[in-house]
């Protein structure tokens, strides 16, 4: 099941990247890092977003992807955000409704792959 979810996500991200879309990810926890490595997501993300000030303006372990505050969504305007902190997808969506209203898209990779847009 995990491998199936991995295939769905990486296939979709390859498609989006091929269209020239900018992809960010939400969550820079140890669990998020594990997901990045297991799913081999490093090449897809321009930056990570995390609400924890201690993680902001750092680089992700090993991959060296910049970790930025949620204000960077408005500043950098990615086309798609993958919610690596998938257990918190609902409050993350609620907090970032403006991103959706401006045409952004969220992807929730687990427990079931889903894309969310307005």
Image: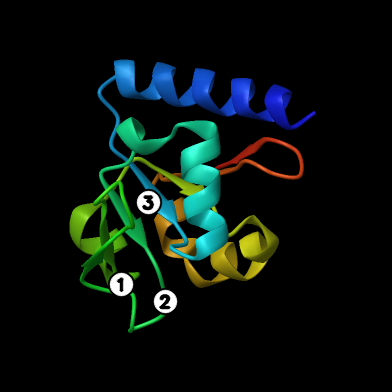
> Where residue 59 sits in the image (x, y, percent)?
24, 61
Color scheme of the displayed model:
rainbow
CB atoms of marks 2 and 3 within 8 Å: no
The residue tagged 2 is 51
* Mark 1 element type: loop
The tag earlier along the polypeptide, 2 or 3, is 2
The residue tagged 1 is 69
* Mark 2 element type: loop
CB atoms of marks 2 and 1 within 8 Å: yes
Observer able to see residue 24: yes
Furthest residue toward right? 1
Furthest residue toward bottom? 53
Q: Which mark is residue 49?
A: none
> Where residue 56 sits in the image (x, y, percent)?
28, 74
Taking the spot 65% from the left edge, 66% from the top edge, the residue there is 88
* Alpha carbon distance from label 2 to label 3: 21 Å
Which of labels 2 and 3 is toward the front? 2
């Amino acid at each position: 099941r995990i491998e199936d979810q991995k295939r769905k996500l990486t296939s979709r991200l390859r498609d989006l990247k091929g269209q020239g879309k900018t992809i960010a990810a939400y969550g820079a926890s140890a669990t998020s890092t594990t997901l990045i490595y297991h799913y081999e997501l490093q090449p897809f993300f321009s930056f990570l977003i995390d609400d924890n000030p201690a993680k902001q303006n750092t680089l992700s372990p090993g991959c060296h992807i910049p970790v930025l505050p949620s204000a960077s969504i408005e500043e950098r305007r990615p086309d798609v955000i993958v919610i690596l902190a998938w257990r918190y997808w609902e409050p993350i969506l609620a907090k970032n409704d403006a991103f959706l209203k401006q045409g952004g898209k969220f992807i929730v990779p687990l427990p079931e792959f889903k894309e969310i847009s307005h």
